């Protein structure tokens, strides 16, 4: 008989996308849902799975979602499957880059609450907002530089069909870990 933790890991290993705790509870048959949350947080701390804001692939709701670590781990972001295929799936790269960018935007909203520096139209591009938050001292220069690199790669992949090579994937993976840790400070 499998433990609840084993059931959760098995479900995540067999799902290609992220899923929320509610859907993971149903799929893994682990109840109550709060037990899934506790187990998933523990698995994330141990770097066995990834948890972060996203859209659940099953119910379509924007929530904290869970996914296999293949997307973030040092061994994982360049998954063995991608290495064997030798095409480093531009679609997977675009999804991951979009996901981390959405997490960054969520953090921007948290640290920028109550700002009066926006103009009449209340819209700033991602890069403009990043520069302003850095200038205001709300984001450290080192973090801002890493965010700019991720955003530049995201734009290359999404708009120019660029496919990062293995070395670039390794660089991005390390950048993701740094930014993910930074984002977690705001999502407590």
Image (cartoon, rainbow, N blue to C red):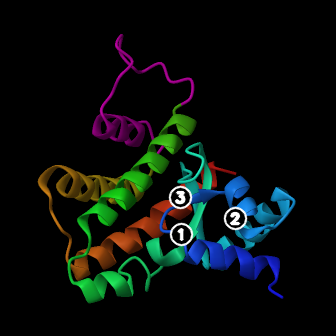
Q: Earlier in the sequence, mark 3 or mark 2?
A: 2
Rendering coords of residue 154 (x, y %) = 27, 55
**CB-based contact (under 8 Å), mark 2 and mark 1:** yes
Give the residue displayed 15% in from the left and 62% down from the top: 162
Majority secondary structure of magenta residues? loop
- Quarter that holds the N terminus: bottom right
Q: Residue at x 70, y 73 (%)?
A: 8
Q: Is residue 53 left or right of residue 158?
A: right
Q: Is residue 184 magenta?
A: no
Q: Residues within 10 Å of mark 3 (few under 14, many from 20)?
A: some
Q: How many marks?
A: 3
Q: Report x, y in % for residue 106.
A: 51, 42
Which residue is denoted by mark 2 in the rendering?
A: 27
Image coords of residue 175 (percent x, y): 39, 68
> As rendered, which of 169 and 133 lies closer to the eye?
169
For marks 3 and 1 on the same chain, the one whose residue lies earlier in the sequence: 1
Q: In which image quadrant can residue 110 be found? A: top right
Give the residue drawn at x 28%, y 89%: 84
The disc placed on residue 15 is 1
Q: State the image quarter where residue 127 is shown.
A: top left
Query: Reading the chain from its start, which is encountered first: label 2 or label 1?
Result: 1
* SS at mark 3 in the image: helix
The residue where tag 3 is placed is 182
| Residue 147, above or below 131 | below
- Secondary structure state at the residue bearing disc 2: helix
**Residue positioned most to the left:** 160
Region in magenta: 113-139
């Amino acid at each position: 008989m499998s433990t609840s933790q084993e059931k959760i890991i098995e479900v995540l290993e067999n799902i290609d996308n992220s899923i929320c705790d509610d859907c993971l509870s149903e799929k893994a048959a682990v109840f109550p849902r709060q037990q899934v949350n506790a187990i998933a947080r523990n698995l994330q701390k141990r770097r066995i799975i990834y948890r972060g804001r996203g859209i659940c692939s099953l119910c379509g709701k924007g929530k904290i979602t869970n996914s296999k670590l293949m997307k973030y781990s040092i061994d994982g972001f360049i998954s063995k499957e991608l290495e064997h295929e030798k095409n480093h799936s531009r679609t997977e790269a675009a999804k991951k880059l979009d996901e981390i960018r959405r997490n960054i935007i969520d953090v921007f909203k948290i640290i920028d609450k109550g700002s009066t520096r926006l103009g009449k139209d209340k819209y700033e591009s991602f890069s403009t907002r990043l520069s302003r938050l850095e200038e205001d001292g709300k984001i450290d220069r080192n973090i801002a530089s890493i965010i700019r690199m991720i955003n530049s790669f995201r734009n290359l992949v999404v708009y120019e069909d660029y496919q990062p090579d293995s070395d670039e994937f390794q660089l991005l993976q390390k950048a993701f870990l740094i930014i993910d840790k930074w984002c977690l400070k705001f999502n407590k």
